[in-house]
Image: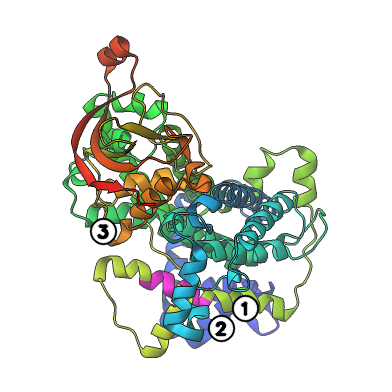
Amino acid sequence: MLIEDGGKFRGAEAVFRTLNRAPGRGLWLKAYRKLPPFAWSAEFFYGQVASHRVFYSRLTDIFWGPALTPGTHRLSRWVFLRLTALAYFAAFASFWSQSAGLVGQNGILPFAGFLDAVHQRFGAEAYRLIPTVLWLSPTDSALNLVCGAGTALSALLLFDIAPGPILLALWALYLSIVDIGGAFMSFQWDMLLIETGFLAIFFAPWRFLPRGRDGEPPVVALWLLRLLLFRLMFESGCVKLLSGDSTWRDLTALCYHYETQPLPTVLGWWANLLPRPVQYFSAGAMFSIELGAPWLIFLPRRARMLGGLAIVLLMTLIALTGNYCFFNLLTVALCATLFDDGFWGRLMPGRLSRENQAAPEKPRRPWRKAIPWLAASPLLAAGLLQVAGLFAGQLSVPGWVGAGFEAVESLRLVNSYGLFAVMTRPRYEISIEGSDDGRDWREYSFRYKPGDLARRPGWIAPFQPRLDWQMWFAALGSYNDGSNRWFLNLLSRIMEGKPEVLALLDKNPFPDAPPTFLRAGLYEYKFTDWAERRATGNWWKREYKRPYCPVLRRRN
């Protein structure tokens, strides 16, 4: 019972009148007064809880734990921003070391020519379609400046320098290189970094110098990051089942995955030897996490943390058996938002925990409160429609809604996710060989993808060798597929002896002058087994299948 000046109040109404005294909680009482169905439902559920207090008390203890006060997320933000800074640093530094050979003036897909072609076709509309700062100066020097600035700003973010402004700059810079990177910057983790980085702008504190005791992060930004994690994991599970691939439906996919994934690790070789029942169980456990754990995000704190731990476990196992660049790191960063400060406080050093937890909450100006909400509305709508599209196909929306989605799409703010929707079974690798006379052929070797049969698979993540990755995709199709037309450019640059492109390779068998002829063949690669490994010392075995493209001849 609640006694106020207006009288005595019982049940749900008393609860809502009590909440009305807390800042920002008056919406419940307004809904109770103006929406009769809500009032009836509230009183019904209040009666159910009141009649079974012991049961619901135990249930509350299970899901919430002994602390019933709302959790804070300052330490969660601190962890999230550090992991995001590491992901940005890995992404910028990795691409910077390869940019000249991939998209530079003498690279495989020169970005200056791409921008020029887009501008000639679309005119001023090109600036909206390809929002990159490199329009200002489409040169290798400007590209180096963008990559170097991104790398430096990522390091500053790691040390808590100007997190809000730096995250805004990092997002704009990374979007700029993704837009000109073509096939080499089209991976799902690139899109995930852009989307995560944009939401982080609203989640981070806006100040310049490091200091403890920042205020609580905006709750809407927190939930947008959690919803992104939900979409990432749930879509990843759904696309595997919706693709119709039989290996996912009968749980045999992992019998092929470790051997056929783009860049396995040595633990992937070992995992490939596990008995089939273990592979079936592992696939079932993976589906349980991808399809089940995301729903725990919407439950109370203990269930939410359980979902986070399950996703982190899955990311750890994936990182141990395969090289997926900064994808696992970025997903773990999103998982950090599922844990409150009570969890992180037990893991962090005392001083760091006290500095971030003991902050007095400062009132925000109304305009600063409104900014995350203004960003949330279109992103939330686009995200929900994107998930619905998985099951309903192409959805019909009003014209003005479609125009808004086009703006979101050009900035890559809402993306679809789902790796390995269809499991690759045979593993094909492209071998590039050169010759001066058309009879004696010597093979070019790559730094990281399978080639040398005796080279042990290793760990290179979060670094991403983007040419090696694209060679894996190219082997799945033909050299003249629309998505693989860069491959002939690669062969052309090798025959021209471009040092920027040759630097992407491990070994150049023609150090003095480029070869007269080039050819590419397709091999099927398989892991060796225990006996073959002991007998030969090789990690791989291969069998020639067919030519991949016609023999090319260099003309002066």
Compared with 550, 392 (above or below) is below
* Kind of residue at disc 1: Gly
Outermost residue, front side:
556
Marks 1 & 2, CB-CB < 8 Å contact: yes
Q: Nearer the viewer, residue 317 or 410?
A: 410
Q: Tell me the chief SS of the magenta region.
A: helix
Residue 314 sits inside the magenta stretch: no
Marks 3 & 1, CB-CB < 8 Å contact: no
Q: Secondary structure at mark 3?
A: loop
- Distance from disc 1 to disc 2, alpha carbons, whole Å, reads 7 Å
Q: Position of residue 51 (x, y in %)?
A: 44, 60
- Distance from disc 3 to disc 1, alpha carbons, whole Å, reads 59 Å
Q: Position of residue 103 (x, y in %)?
A: 50, 57
Q: Position of residue 480 (x, y in %)?
A: 25, 57
Q: Nearer the viewer, residue 417 or 21?
A: 417
Q: Secondary structure at mark 1?
A: loop
**Residue at (64%, 51%) from the top-left corner?**
85
- Distance from disc 3 to disc 2, alpha carbons, whole Å, reads 60 Å
Query: Left or right: where does residue 483 sit relative to residue 38?
Result: left
- How would you rate the neighbour count of disc 2 (Cα within 10 Å): few for under 14, some for 14-19, many for 20 or more? few
**Residue at (56%, 70%) from the top-left corner?**
132
Read off the residue under disc 2. Answer: 30
Residue 218 appearing in the image? no
In the figure, residue 109 lies in which quadrant? bottom left
- Can you tell which mark lies on residue 26? 1
Mark 3 or 1, closer to the camera: 3
Q: Nearer the viewer, residue 479 or 499?
A: 499
- Can you tell which mark lies on residue 481? 3
Q: Nearer the viewer, residue 101 or 235?
A: 101
Q: Which residues are magenta?
A: 377-385
